[in-house]
Amino acid sequence: MKTIRAILVGCLIWILGSSFYTASYFIPILDNLELQANLVLAITIIPNAWLGAHIFYRKGAEMHGLKLGTLVATTAIILDAIITVPFLILPQGGNYRDFFGAPAFWLIALEIVLIILSYYHFRVKQPLLSN
């Protein structure tokens, strides 16, 4: 059950992230819209991943933050492979290799894992010495 819940949280974070990424193209601020979209995603993923971790842990679910972060990031990667690339990247002339080979993609995946791990350490994990 907690794995399914983690996958659902991953879907939520992916939906939010994809929405912010796509919406950023409609408000051009920078000349390089791809860079702008990646910056928007990198910034907005912070509260999105924190919210996802909060939703997962709010009912006392127990899973290490590293495992949850990895499951969430893996879910987002799979959704990118079956939805984002075929419907948004390929029609624009992109390909899977360029999408998954971009350093920004892997940095954002790492960011998700680290944010969820941080939530776990600051909000869930019990201190070693509690008086």
Image (cartoon, grey):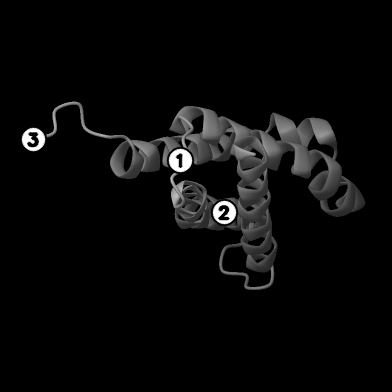
Considering only vertical position in the picture, is 18 above or below 99? below
| Mark linked to residue 42 | none
Q: Report which residue position mark 2 lands on.
A: 41
Q: Secondary structure under badge 3? A: loop
Question: Which residue is depicted at the point 91% across and 52% down?
Answer: 91
Instruction: Tell me which label, 2 or 3, sits earlier in the chain.
Output: 2
Question: Which residue is depicted at the point 54% across and 58% down?
Answer: 40
Q: Report which residue position mark 1 lands on.
A: 116
Single out the mark in the foreground, 2 or 3.
3
CA–CA distance in space, label 2 to label 3: 41 Å
Q: Report which residue position mark 3 lands on.
A: 131
Q: Secondary structure under badge 2? A: helix
Asked whether, in this view, residue 63 is left or right of residue 82, the answer is: left
Asked whether, in this view, residue 55 is left or right of residue 120, the answer is: right
Estimate the x, y position of residue 17 in percent, counting from the top left: 62, 55
**Which image quarter: residue 22?**
bottom right
Question: Which residue is depicted at the point 32% across and 45% down?
Answer: 123
**Amino acid type at mark 2:** Leu
